[in-house]
Image (cartoon, grey):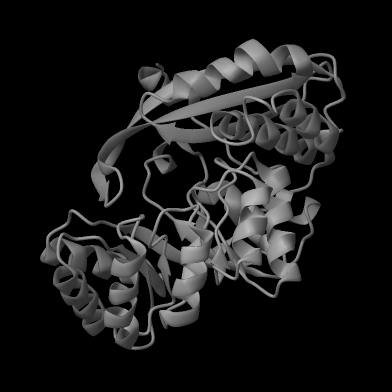
Amino acid sequence: MNIDRIETTLYRIPLPVPVQAASHGVMSEFDLVAVRVGTASGATGVGYTVLNAGHGVAAAAIVENVFKAKLLGEDSRRIEWLWQKLWRGHHYSGRGGLVSFALAAVDTALWDLRGRALGEPLWRLLGGYRPEVRAYAGNIDLNFPMEQLLDGVRRSLAAGYRSVKMRLGRPLLREDVERVAAVRALIGPDIELMTDANEAWRPDEAMRAFHALREFGLVWIEEPIRPDDFEGYARLRAQGGVPIAAGENLHTVAEFTALIAAGGVDFPEPDLTTCGGITPWMKVARLAEAHGLPVTSHGAHDVHVHLLAAVPNGAYLEVHGFGLDRFIAQRLELRDGMAIAPDRPGHGIEFDWKGMEIYRA
C-alpha cells in the first residue's frame, strides 16, 4: 500500500447564488483543491479542501511542491504518522493557515483510500456510532431581502429539514431582530433555528445582540466575535443567555483546546477542510466529548456526515448550498430531517471530473 502517485488539481467554481457574510462581503465563487493519492495496487483515495477564490493556488502548491516528495514511497496506511510528519515538518511556517488547508486534502484522501481498500465506509471505520445525523439547512443568506429569506426557509422545510440557520450582522441590530422574529413566526416553536454572525460584532455589540435575541429560542449564535478572542467568548457564554457555536475559523487542535478550556463554546464546530483533515477533526470531537460538549460541522457535508456519524456526541450536520452537489454522483441522503451516512466504501464521493474540467484553474 505504498504511495506511488499524487495528483493535485485546482478548480475555481462559481456559486449557484452569490452569498454574503458580515465578515467577508459577497462571495460568488470559491477554490477547490482536489488531491488524488494512489498506490501500486491501483487503489485511489480522493480528498479536497475549499478556500476563498484566489487562495487555492497556494494550498495546491504546498501539496504539489512540498508534501508530494515527502509522501511518495510511504505506507498509505500510516495515516497518523504521515500527518505528524507533514505537520512537524512545516511547524515553523505552518501551525495552521494554508498548511492546515493543504494537509486536509491529503489526509482526507488517505482516509478515503483506507476505507476503499477495506471496503468500509468512513463512519464505521472511524467508530461507527450511528449512521443518522441531525441536519440543518445552512444556506439562508445575509444579503437576501426579507421575502427571499423567508422563501429560502420555506424551501428548506419543504425539503424535509427540521432545523434551519440564518445569518446575522445587518447594519442595524434592529434589522437582525426583525429578521429573526419573522423567521421564528414562520417556522413556529418546534423547528430549530440557528444563527450565524460571521464575526460581525465587537464583544460589547455581541452582548447587546445576545440579549436582544434571547427570546427567540435559538439553538445557537455562531461566531459572534473574532475567532481567537477566547476570553470574549467565555464572557458571552456566561452572560449572553444564548448558546454559542464556534470553530470554523480555528485551524489547530490547540486552538480548540484553548477555546474549550476558556469555557467559551457550547457547540465546537471543526471543519475538516480548514483544521488539517479528518485526523485532527476526530481529536477535536473527542476533546469535546471529554468536556461534555456536542460537536457540529461546517461545510463539506458529504464528508462530515461520516465523522459526525462516527462519534457519540455528533449533534448537527450543516448542509450548505455551495454548489458541489452538481458534481457528485450520489448526493447526500436526507430522511425526516436526518442526514444518512452512506455505506459506500471510503467517503463514497464520486466526482464528475469531466464536468468539473471547465472550472479547472
Indicate whether 298 appears above or below 159: above
Indicate whether 180 appears above or below 224: below
Indicate whether 234 appears above or below 256: below
Residue 65 at least partly seen: yes
Q: Position of residue 331 (x, y in %)?
A: 49, 48
Q: Position of residue 343 (x, y in %)?
A: 69, 53
Q: Where is residue 269 in the image (x, y as percent from the top left)?
A: 55, 58
The residue at the point 47 percent across, 53 percent down is 227
Quadrant of the rendered structure where residue 287 is? Answer: bottom right
The residue at the point 62 percent across, 55 percent down is 256
Residue 335 at least partly seen: no
Quadrant of the rendered structure where residue 288 is? Answer: bottom right
The residue at the point 46 percent across, 29 percent down is 32
Residue situated in front as seen by the camera: 30 or 333: 30
Tell me if 302 is positioned left or right of 115 in this view. left
Quarter the N terminus occupies: top right
Residue situated in front as seen by the camera: 215 or 331: 215
The residue at the point 37 percent across, 41 percent down is 323
- Count of numbered circles on the image: 0
Quadrant of the rendered structure where residue 140 is? Answer: bottom left
Tell me if 305 is positioned left or right of 191 in this view. right
Tell me if 126 is positioned left or right of 131 in this view. right
Quarter the C terminus occupies: top left
Q: Where is residue 97 in the image (x, y as percent from the top left)?
A: 54, 34
